Amino acid sequence: MTFTSPHDRLLDRLGEVAVRIGLNVAPGQQVVITAPLDAVPLVRRITEHAYRAGASLVTPLFSDDAMTLARFHYAPDAAFDVAGGWLHEGMARAYREGAARMAITGANPVLLSQEDPDRVARANKATSLAGRPAMELITSFATNWNIVACATPAWAAQVFPDDAPDRALARLWDAIFLASRVTVDDPVAAWAEHNAALHRRADWLNARRFAGLHFTGPGTDLTVGLADGHLWAGGSEPAQNGIVCNPNIPTEEVFTTPHALRVDGHVRATKPLFHQGTLIDGIAVRFEGGRIVQAQATQGLAVLERILATDDGARRLGEVALVPHSSPISQSGVLFRNTLFDENASSHIALGQAYTKCMLDTDGQTPEQLAARGANSSFIHIDWMIGSAEIDVTAITRDGGREPLMKHGEWVNTP
């Protein structure tokens, strides 16, 4: 292939990494892609590489910010309790039948910040309810899946507001390429090395079998118990269909399943949360018996409260992840205003649905049995950041002992 610019070459590398490392598309496999309209050039590169890898069919589904806003400006009030269940059912069927799932992120992170928070919450809830069958397949790793990013003008304007539009977009692309490890001569080899490092850390944590984690620092004194038979993961992982994939590009985390009933204390977010077009900043919550009993936010509190009211599991944790403050994304100094990146700059927790993939011996277990082991169930899964250079993490051993895991945001005594 002939490239007309360095940008085109890097865009092609990102498409190749998304297919070969992110999805690891198998011959004959179908691929479903969701993406914003601005991502068409990247979608084309991913599609080409998917077919080169042997994909039988690539189906793109596009979203558009202007059309999303049109709904909020002109649709009747009852429309915000409606979601395209038929579409989500079709996607779930595709995943059950073996299709790979590729999601491209890049929408305006504050698209809905000026809209009625009640309507935003209702629309999000309706979408979450309709998408539950597909979400369960993804969180259980029933098929290989990946999320990768595309720079868009609206997103770039939020990340680099002082730059001219063209300069902001170029800077965001540069940051994405660097974080996604495609600026090196051999990105595929670089990802293999990075995955091996994440696997060593996850293996060490699995061998230690800690009972819980204790986060301490400014505004934070939080104990997170870990699910019975939890399993740490990070980097590439085998899906249930046997295909080894990298769910997130980029990724710097190792993560596992917390126990939904064993979270206590208070915690303050260290970065703002940008969730489905709205900004929630200054989050501070208190847990008792695994449940958030008090929540505050300096901005977006109404949206946060509606998220927490989604269902019984929305006030409990489904994931805890450890990321060193020295991660490349953190050291870039860029606040991406996008969870895919910001969660890989900081240790984080997630409200809602647990990844049952991060539990041992789950074959044949009922939802009730998984819940008894601590796996949370919810229509949502929302990551938010709690780590920084001021946060320490102490491991709690099974006999009640304590071992330092992270000091000032950095790993200690681990591979």
Image (cartoon, rainbow, N blue to C red):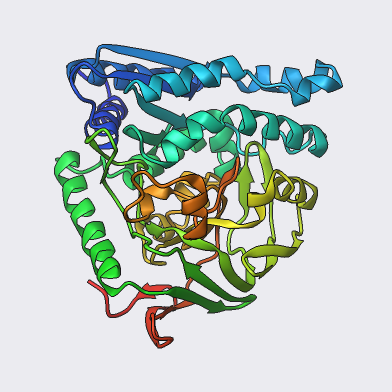
Q: Position of residue 322 (x, y in %)?
A: 41, 64
Considering depth in this image, is 25 or 72 the residue closer to the camera? Answer: 25
The residue sitting at 29% across, 24% down in the picture is 8
Question: In the image, is 387 to the left or to the right of 254?
Answer: right
Q: Position of residue 66 (x, y in %)?
A: 66, 19
Question: In the image, is 293 to the left or to the right of 208?
Answer: right
Quadrant of res 397: bottom left
Q: In this view, does 299 lie above or below 91?
A: below
The residue sitting at 40% across, 88% down in the picture is 401
For this orientation, the residue located farthest to the bottom is 401
Considering depth in this image, is 209 or 394 the residue closer to the camera? Answer: 209
Quadrant of res 101: top left
Q: Where is residue 51 in the image (x, y as percent from the top left)?
A: 23, 15
Q: Where is residue 175 in the image (x, y as percent from the top left)?
A: 40, 44
- Does the image show residue 187? yes
Considering depth in this image, is 259 or 296 the residue closer to the camera? Answer: 259
The residue sitting at 62% across, 45% down in the picture is 274
Q: Quadrant of the C terminus?
A: bottom left
Q: In this view, does 122 lie above or below 365?
A: above
Q: Quadrant of the N terminus?
A: top left
The residue sitting at 49% across, 29% down in the picture is 134
Question: In the image, is 302 to the left or to the right of 401?
Answer: right
Quadrant of res 173: top left
Question: In the image, is 134 to the left or to the right of 179?
Answer: right
Q: Is residue 204 above or below residue 152?
A: below
Q: Is residue 374 above or below residue 368?
A: below
- Does the image show residue 390? no
